[in-house]
Amino acid sequence: MTARPGSGAPVVLINDTRADLHHGCWRVMRTLEAQLARAGFAVIARAPAHADWRQDPAIVEAIPRAALVVVNGEGTLHHDRPAGAALLAAGAAAKAAGVPAALINASWDANGPAYTHALADFALVSARETRSAAQIQAAGLTARVVPDLSVFEAVAPPATRVGVGFTDSVLRPVALDLEAARKRLGGIALPIHFNAPGLKGSLRNLRDGVAKRDLADPGFLVRSIAARLAWRAAETRDEADYMAKIAALSLLVTGRFHAATFALAAGTPVLAVESNTHKIGATFDDAGLASWRRIAPADLDAALLARAARWEPEEAQALADFLADGRRRTIALFDDLASLAR
């Protein structure tokens, strides 16, 4: 997909995750593009998430004209997924064209030698958390650590905090367990995804959460449909409004990485169930949060919610330091991208 040209060094951006209709992805992309502009870049082509950029003539044609190719890794690069291999192939394509490439904002988990070989084509690699960087470094490559771009913007603290919010998880059984806990404990539904208004959006909401295999388990199917309907009714259309809702909570309970990072950015106490990689727990470690904030849905009860709604003193200071240091690292990253551009 080509972009309207502007003044600045031309950059090709791979993996624009706004296609996911997910507030975390939208916040990441808004921050990424703002920082590219601050560093003196103009995006000349964007490849959306879930589309193989190698099949897009506009992207292929734009790479040799670029001063830099930037790949937004997010949560794609784990367990040798084919989608991750497609992203990593951008490094080789850029290298063949004599253009430097950078992989940024990436988690890296349980990948094999082929992935590692492809990673070597990038002139700069930035991981979202220390655990991902350690796996890359163990393979003999270099990676810096810069927190996920969703925590870059400072969030003003609210006058008061009220309520316990719940999200779902990419792991469908976990998502249903979290929804059951929300109902049992009287929480607020705060899905991080949103859909188009009207029937089209409602149908997509159901399609994304219900699979053909669920027909073999009618109980699971009924619970899935009920959960999707509840989340559809609770959708927030605007990213800033979603952040404001997270910031106003006493506590967030989540199985979603970006919902957790929204809570960190807002200073909202959080409990989280790990996702399909180490990214939530690894980020909590980097932010200095207590290990007991990583939970299983079965752990949830009123006593835990009451305890979790208060930061421990050492957590509050560690989180403040993490956010301030992360902003400095983010600015330094994009300054280094400007130096890297040919």
Image (cartoon, rainbow, N blue to C red):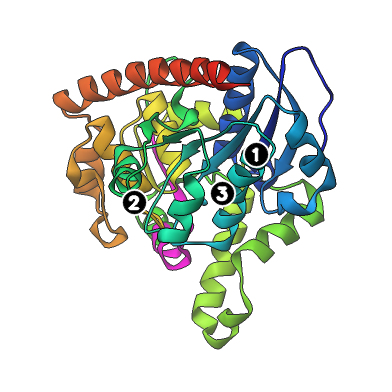
Residue farthest bottom in this picture: 216
Residue 88: numbered disc: 3
Q: Amino acid at mark 1?
A: Ala
| Distance from the alpha carbon under mark 3 to that under mark 2 | 20 Å
Q: Earlier in the sequence, mark 3 or mark 1?
A: 3
Q: Nearer the viewer, residue 26 or 267?
A: 26
- Which mark sits nearer the N-terminus, 1 or 2? 1
Task: Please identify, in this view, whether the residue under mark 1 or under mark 2 is nearer the observer.
Answer: 1
* Residue 176 lies within the magenta run: yes
Magenta part of the chain: 163-178
Image coordinates for residue 255, horizontal then vertical, percent: 41, 51
Residue beneath disc 1: 94
Q: Is residue 159 visible?
A: no
Report which residue position mark 2 lands on. Answer: 278
Q: Quadrant of residue 252?
A: top left
Q: Is residue 139 left or right of residue 221?
A: left
Q: Quadrant of residue 307?
A: top left
Q: For the point 62% across and 54% down, which residue is it?
A: 86
- 190 above or below 241? below
- Which circle's residue, 3 or 2, is located before the other in the chain? 3
| Front residue of this view, candidates 158 and 196 | 196
Where residue 215 appears, as percent x and y from the top left, is: 60, 84
Task: Name which residue lies at 48% across and 65% down.
Answer: 172
Q: Amino acid at mark 2?
A: His
